[in-house]
Amino acid sequence: MRRCCAEARRSDNERTASWFAWAILLVTMVLVLTSVARDATGRVLDVSGQCSVATIMMPVPVTLEGGIQLDTPGELTLLKFGIESELDFTATVWDAALHMNSAINMAGLERVIVDFSAPLGPIAMKLELWNAVPFETVTDVDHFTNWVTIPPGDLMFVKTRLTTSVEISSVTFENLFMLEDVTFPNPYADFGPLQYSVQSQSFHAGDILTISFEPYPGVSVRSVTNFCADSGSRPVKGYSASGRVDAEESLCDYCCWDEALSITGLQYCGIPFWLSLKIDPVADDVLRLSGGGSFSALGDLELSGSFSLFPFLIGGYSFSFTWCDAISASVSLTKDFELTSMSFRGSFDIPFGAMTGRLTSSGSFDETLEATSLSFNVSATQGTFSGGVGVNVTQQSGDLRLSSVSGNLGMTLTPVRATFSILFARTGLRQASLDVGVTF
């Protein structure tokens, strides 16, 4: 009986949090629209956004008579389909904007994200309400990664994010307050329990305060203070944002905090460098001071390095250069100037007659100068049509092998656009997709 009463009270609390968040959004919208209505003469409602439908196709492994599933790919096979529709909508009235992002797929509704932003005098405010269906990642009988809803599969209130920012005497203050369900399933990982309902939710509060200013032209100071939060993300299906609440502590119970202070744009004898100080009272290293610098030795050749003072460590060095804005390369070295890795990237225009073409290539090498990956991409555009082909080669079992070949074709006839893409791996077709959208 006590357990049932506790679960009932918890359910009521979660519903109260959801309704409270929606009430804040509605009241804020009414107040802002009322305050700006006086200056609205001659202005109209502006609506923009896009709606798209994406179809994903993947081959199913060949199965012989008797249910024997082959490991080798077949030329003729069945296709597994996935269909997802997404709507991204923004309505702007004067200086206020209401934005909604939602998606639905073959498993049902994914998410409904609503945010409202508007200035209140010198303060810019943005209120977000996240509602989503709990998903998890599984491996099906055909050895494919798949996403399924977690019963009962209801649309649930997940989090509220309130961002406020103001600039006072060239000092910018930005505060992010979050009320978040810290136990909501990660859609890109396996979830152990067989169901997730409102009784399973656990809401914590957190806050991130960012202060930035320039004490001197070219020198930037940035302070980030986390209160029961960090800069990571806690995503829902198909949507994420920087900033998440601590899963163990909450502002409502106990305030844990950490501070990161960084200074960039400093110079000594013409050599620019930066410093960063992190304070975390509960970490093994309460104070951690690090820094780095770089200088140009010969033209576009640049040497950079990093270090830590508490504790004292040399992070290593890197060389980088750019030639004619077309080729760039970098070399990473240890603190003893031993090679650890190399990489390059090049981009060139190709004359295709009436079409505009471009070739892009990149590669990476290990400490023995053996290639670990190579990629080549060719793209071309002409008016409403575009297309491209990409080839990737990676090191597998000590040898360079073809890992993937991809292609894409696109057509844009405003306001309609369509894109078809296909991906072949070493073992055959991996995925094909058709994306059709309308921009308004």
Image: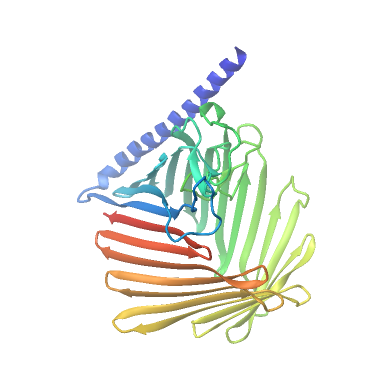
Comparing 7 with 93, the one in front is 7
Q: Is residue 416 left or right of residue 167?
A: left
Q: Is residue 224 above or below residue 317?
A: above
The residue under the point 36% across, 70% down is: 387
The answer to whether residue 71 is left or right of residue 314 is: left
The residue nearer to you, when weighing 323 against 35, is: 323
Which residue is farthest left?
42
Instruction: List x then y, in percent, for residue 328.
Output: 55, 79
**Quadrant showing the N terminus:** top right
Quadrant of image for the C terminus? bottom left
Q: Residue at x 37, y 52 (%)?
A: 55
Q: Nearer the viewer, residue 362 or 219?
A: 362
Image coordinates for residue 10, horizontal then vertical, percent = 55, 23
Residue 5 placement, left or right of 405: right
Residue at the outermost front position:
65
**Residue 219 shows in the view:** yes
Q: Is residue 271 something that shows in the picture?
A: no
Rendered residue at 24%/62% (across/down): 414
Residue 172, image x, y percentages: 51, 55
Please identify the quarter of the rendering in which residue 433 is found: bottom left
Place residue 214 in its image quadrant.
bottom right
Q: Is residue 375 above or below residue 211?
A: below
